[in-house]
Image (cartoon, rainbow, N blue to C red):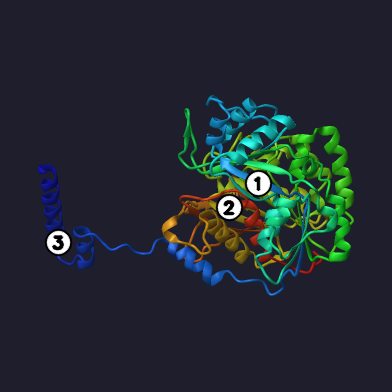
């Protein structure tokens, strides 16, 4: 009690001294010192209001979007709870490119849980996977959802009533039942059984043994041969003649990685040949996902898909891995530490568009747009003159990340927080420009050569209900608000 009384007395003396030393001191400052102030709207409120004012659809919108080719049923379950039910003990984390046993699963899960990072792996043993899948489906609180990047993107696009969506992939009876009725599925995509993916989620601060998750995320694994071989790709491309889309969204390349080099090397060539049959005037967005084989990623970048797509979507793990596989900027980084540095991210995005895109007037590549997303912020990097409405598109992606993670239709500022850096640089190396976040105008824009960058902060959900599919929703929303400009000669 005496300490509290002394503190009050000291505060009173301090205020008295300040007033007598400067009688002109404004009363509002004295009131702020001596009495608690009512809460004022924070940056979260300002950003949320700015989003509502500034996010507008482009003048030219997509009318028919074709999405393929990975689709499945997601079984979402507590990762720690399921592993405990499988009678495995916590231990040391260790990454595995392919999972062969419950022990591999446990080690890989702990490895990524300790980092709060998302990952996806192939489980090679079909019988062991099926036993784990049965245990997951029977675990208390387990939930079944539409899964697979293509199906999730299709579901998000189908929320726009004036948009026709074609989904092609291995669609079994359970998945077909769960899909939005607005989604069209070609008859050749229907199959008798569903493909299941297991999603092991963990919460921010959740602990298992000595491992504590710094943020909420998930670990995905499956034994999925149909998606792994992209068996629906040719059916997908063949269906485009009749559907006549004005945008194609392609995903599922990462699923082939676990099939072995001999299979993916041949299948990639066939996939490129099939995708090359899509009319040149139809833009293609490629959605990337977690991979571990640098040789496989290098094939996608240099010899295969990257030059024939118009746009790509990826997160921080995929961005750094892409740079490591191609010898790009900051490839010596083992992993990001905390929120990825904006300058480093900007360097890698610029490198991709300069090395594999159409930022060079002499390049024949189609790639002109990259949608990068991480927990705290998103960046849209586009070749000048190729895309419009990108400020609204990057804000729309950030907004859906906030609402979907919290399970809400609109932003609740009491449930989100701003974690984006307030100040950052346009590059990690010289020349670099110091930039700042302005909540009232929540898109920071800068240019490097022929590439324009739009950065938007994310209002991060404090207690996310579900993290699966956020990247797919972000990319889908960003595409809805994007406008492809008529190709101009350089």
Report whether residue 278 is seen.
no
Task: Give me the disc on residue 426.
Answer: 2
Say whether residue 191 is left or right of residue 49.
right
Q: Along the polypeptide, which appears first: circle 2 or circle 3?
A: 3
In terms of image quadrants, where is residue 446?
bottom right
- The location of residue 398, given as percent across then percent down, is 56, 58
Do the numbered discs 3 and 1 sit on residues whose CB atoms are within 8 Å? no
Count neighbours of disc 1 (C-alpha within 10 A) and say few if under 14, some if 14 to 19, many if 20 or more: many
Q: Along the polypeptide, which appears first: circle 3 or circle 1?
A: 3
Q: Secondary structure at mark 3?
A: helix
Report whether residue 264 is seen.
yes
Residue of label 1: 74
- The location of residue 195, given as percent across then percent down, is 73, 44
Say whether residue 216 is left or right of residue 14.
right
Q: Secondary structure at mark 1?
A: strand
Q: Along the polypeptide, which appears first: circle 1 or circle 2?
A: 1
Count neighbours of disc 3 (C-alpha within 10 A) and say few if under 14, some if 14 to 19, many if 20 or more: some
The image shows residue 265, relative to residue 406, as above or below, that is above
Which is nearer the eye, 404 or 433? 404
Residue of label 3: 19
């Amino acid at each position: 009690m005496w300490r509290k009384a002394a503190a009050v007395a000291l505060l009173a003396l301090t205020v008295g001294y300040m007033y007598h030393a400067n009688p002109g001191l404004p009363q509002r400052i004295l009131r702020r010192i001596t009495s608690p102030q009512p809460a004022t709207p924070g940056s979260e409120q300002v950003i949320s209001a700015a989003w509502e004012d500034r996010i507008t659809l482009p003048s030219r919108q997509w009318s028919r979007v074709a999405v393929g080719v990975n689709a499945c049923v997601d079984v979402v379950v507590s990762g720690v709870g399921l592993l405990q039910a499988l009678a495995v003990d916590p231990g040391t984390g260790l990454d595995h490119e392919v999972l062969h046993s419950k022990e591999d699963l446990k080690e890989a899960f702990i490895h990524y849980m300790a980092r709060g990072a998302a990952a996806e792996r192939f489980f090679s043993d079909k019988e062991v996977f099926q036993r784990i899948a049965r245990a997951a489906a029977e675990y208390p609180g387990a939930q079944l959802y539409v899964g697979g990047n293509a199906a999730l993107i299709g579901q998000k696009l189908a929320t726009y009533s004036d948009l026709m969506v074609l989904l092609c992939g291995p669609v079994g009876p359970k998945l077909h039942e769960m899909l939005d009725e607005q989604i069209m599925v070609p008859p050749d995509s229907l199959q008798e059984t569903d493909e299941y993916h297991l999603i092991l989620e963990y919460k921010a601060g959740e602990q298992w043994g000595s491992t504590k998750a710094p943020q909420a995320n998930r670990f995905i694994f499956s034994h999925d041969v149909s998606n792994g071989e992209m068996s629906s790709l040719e059916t997908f491309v063949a269906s485009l003649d009749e559907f006549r889309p004005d945008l194609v969204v392609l995903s599922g390349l990462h699923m082939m990685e676990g099939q072995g080099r001999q299979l993916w090397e041949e299948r990639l060539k066939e996939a490129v040949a099939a995708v090359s049959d899509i009319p040149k005037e139809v833009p293609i967005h490629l959605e990337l996902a977690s991979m571990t084989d640098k040789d496989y990623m290098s094939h996608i970048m240099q010899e295969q898909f990257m030059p024939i797509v118009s746009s790509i979507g990826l997160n921080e793990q995929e961005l750094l891995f892409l740079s490591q596989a191609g010898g790009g900027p900051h490839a010596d980084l083992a992993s990001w530490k905390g929120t990825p540095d904006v300058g480093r991210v900007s360097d890698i995005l610029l490198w991709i568009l300069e090395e594999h895109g159409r930022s060079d007037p002499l390049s024949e590549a189609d790639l002109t747009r990259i949608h990068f997303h991480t927990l705290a912020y998103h960046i849209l990097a586009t070749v000048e003159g190729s895309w419009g409405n990108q400020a609204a598109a990057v804000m729309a992606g950030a907004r859906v990340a906030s609402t979907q993670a919290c399970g809400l239709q609109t932003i609740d500022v009491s449930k989100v927080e701003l974690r984006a850096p307030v100040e950052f640089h346009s590059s990690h190396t010289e020349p670099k420009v110091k930039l700042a976040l302005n909540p009232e105008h929540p898109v920071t824009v800068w240019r490097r050569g022929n590439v324009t960058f739009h950065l938007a902060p994310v209002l991060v959900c404090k207690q996310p209900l579900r993290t699966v599919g956020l990247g797919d929703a972000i990319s889908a929303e960003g595409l809805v608000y994007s406008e492809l400009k008529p190709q101009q000669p350089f």
